[in-house]
Image (tube, helix red, strand yellow):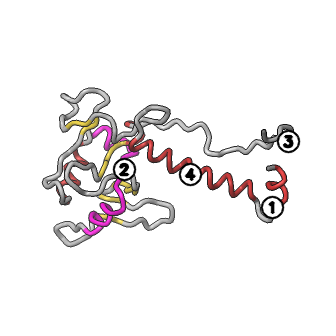
Amino acid sequence: TSWVLEDSQFNLEKWLNENVVDEFALKENAAFFNGDGVDKPTGFLTVPQTEEDDADRAFGTLQTVPAGSATVIEQDDLVNLMMSLRSPYRMRGNCAWIMNRTTAAIVRKMKDADGRLIWSDSLAAGQPATLLGYPVFESEEMDSVAADSIPIAFGNWGAGYLIADRSNRMRLLRDPFTRPG
């Protein structure tokens, strides 16, 4: 009620806005990955997928790159995935890796032939870590490493997936004229 908003000991309106926005963001993020397109976005993991290359793949179908093993990720698998993206898309920027934290823990431990980690933590606050030169982002919506799963995604997200947000702020409208019921 307006009375509660005006007389509370802390800024209830701010708290409400922050919590509702956070909840919307969680649901929106889940839809970007797994949405069915009905009253929500179509998630990139729910569109048709194939192992076919660009020349043979139907428009709107995502390419998957199988790993050498269904339950183990090797460094070569990461390189194969990265290099499967055509050069014009890889060179334009906006490319990034996405994986969940369990998969990230596996990848963080990988080393090159000289014993150096291939995962580089950021040296600047607010900047993502990099993997093979590209930013890495974590999302719990991604699968863990298992048979018939997609544990890692790599792509030019600016070219391949459009998100059109109207506003990043929720507004609270107070109605002093109507009464409940």
SS assignment at label 2: strand
Residue annotated with mark 1: 8
Q: Which residue is mark 3?
A: 176
**Mark 1 closeness class: few <14, some 14–19, many ≥20 residues within 10 Å:** few
Residues at marks 1 and 2, CA–CA distance in whole angstroms: 44 Å
Question: Could you say which is closer to the camera, residue 69 or residue 135?
Answer: 69
Q: Which residues are magenta?
A: 87-109
- For marks 3 and 2, give the one nearer the viewer: 3
In this view, the residue in front, 66 or 95, is 66
C-beta proximity under 8 Å, tags 4 and 3: no
Q: Earlier in the sequence, mark 1 or mark 2?
A: 1
Cβ–Cβ below 8 Å for labels 2 and 4?
Answer: no
| Secondary element at tag 1 | loop
Q: CA distance from mark 2 to mark 4?
A: 25 Å
| Pointer 3 or 1: first along the chain | 1
- The residue carrying mark 4 is 23
Distance Cα–Cα, label 4 vs label 1: 23 Å
Q: Dot 3: within a 10 Å radius of its alpha carbon, few (fewer than 14), some, or many (20 or more) residues?
A: few
| Residue of label 2 | 96
Q: Position of residue 131 (x, y in %)?
A: 31, 59
Quarter where residue 133 is shown = bottom left
- Amino acid type at mark 4: Glu
Q: Is residue 53 left or right of residue 108?
A: left
